[in-house]
Amino acid sequence: MENCKIIAVANQKGGTGKTTTASNMGNALAHEGKRVLLVDFDPQANLSMSFGIERPDELPISMHNVLSLVMDGEPLPDGMEYVLHGERLDIIPSNINLSLTEINLRDEMGGERTLSDLLEPLRTDYDYIVIDTNPYLGLLTINALAACDSVIIPVSPQLWSATGLTDLMQTIFKVKRKINPRITVDGILLTMCDERTNLFKDAKRLLDDFCGDRVKIFETHIPSTVKVGEANYSSRCIMDYDVKSKAALAYMDFAKEVIAHGNSN
């Protein structure tokens, strides 16, 4: 598919709903008839577990193995061996061994493009490739930013920090200047929101002031609800767990906003 878009979901601050957003956005895009590949690029492998992989550390082949072959210049196995196919969407899973990959990337010439080398040939098979990144600005995150077309930044009103967001934006713009000139910031997604509270209203106002006209804030807000945690615990997306829940409806609205934003660009 010629117009495949690679989206990195990134925020170096933990607890912002990054993996939950990657999983549910990917599933909601699939609900809209899009062919979606999830890419777990975090050694914690939470995205893989949300896909139903109970013991990712026991996988015979994972992101670590595939990237090691790319770095060694070895031919990749058939995609069926490292791309796992679900009922609605696919995933390249991860596990703790990805931490070893990050160490090896330090000594790799052009190592920041390793993930890009893996994903570029897969564009023909998908409409969207969604990368879940790890919660710090290291070489794995740089690889994700080098491979993607755009970035979505989940932000929790309870945890948002102007300093942390500034650091992430500076990293994105540095990658844009030096490695990946096509990268853009699609916008900020507010997660775990209780719009009735003064905390949400104050955080939203400060975020509006901080971003100004420079960064889009998505109109959809993901509500704070126990349903999301229950869905994560059962290794299911929120649409499968409770399609009528506020969070499920919000993620489906968000997917439509992502599609419309891409079309407008």
Image (tube, helix red, strand yellow):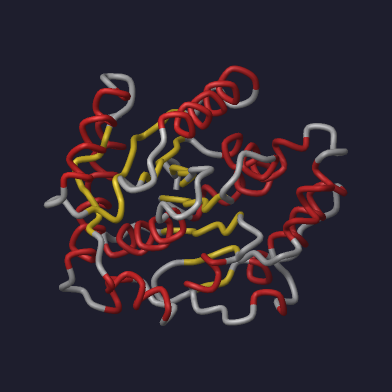
Task: Give left or right: position of 110 versus 147.
Answer: right
Give the number of callouts: 0
State the residue at coordinates (11%, 52%): 196
Where residue 180 appears, as percent x and y from the top left, is: 59, 26
Q: Residue at x 46, y 58 (%)?
A: 19
Position in image of residue 210 (x %, y %): 32, 24
In the rendered view, would you say 230 is above or below 7? Answer: below
Q: Residue at x 88, y 38 (%)?
A: 107
In the image, farthest residue toward the front: 198
Measuring 48% from the left and 51% from the top, which residue is drawn there? 129
Q: Is residue 67 left or right of residue 125?
A: right
- The quadrant the C terminus occupies is top left
Q: Is residue 204 depicted above or below 212 in this figure?
A: below
* Above or below: residue 74 compared with residue 183: below
Residue 44, image x and y in percent?
A: 62, 63
Q: Nearer the viewer, residue 213 or 259?
A: 213
User: In the image shown, does 179 or 174 lie closer to the viewer?
Assistant: 174
Q: Is residue 94 left or right of residue 188?
A: right
| As drawn, 213 above or below 102 | above
Q: Quadrant of residue 65?
A: bottom right
Spot occupied by residue 4 in the image (x, y as percentages of width and height): 44, 44
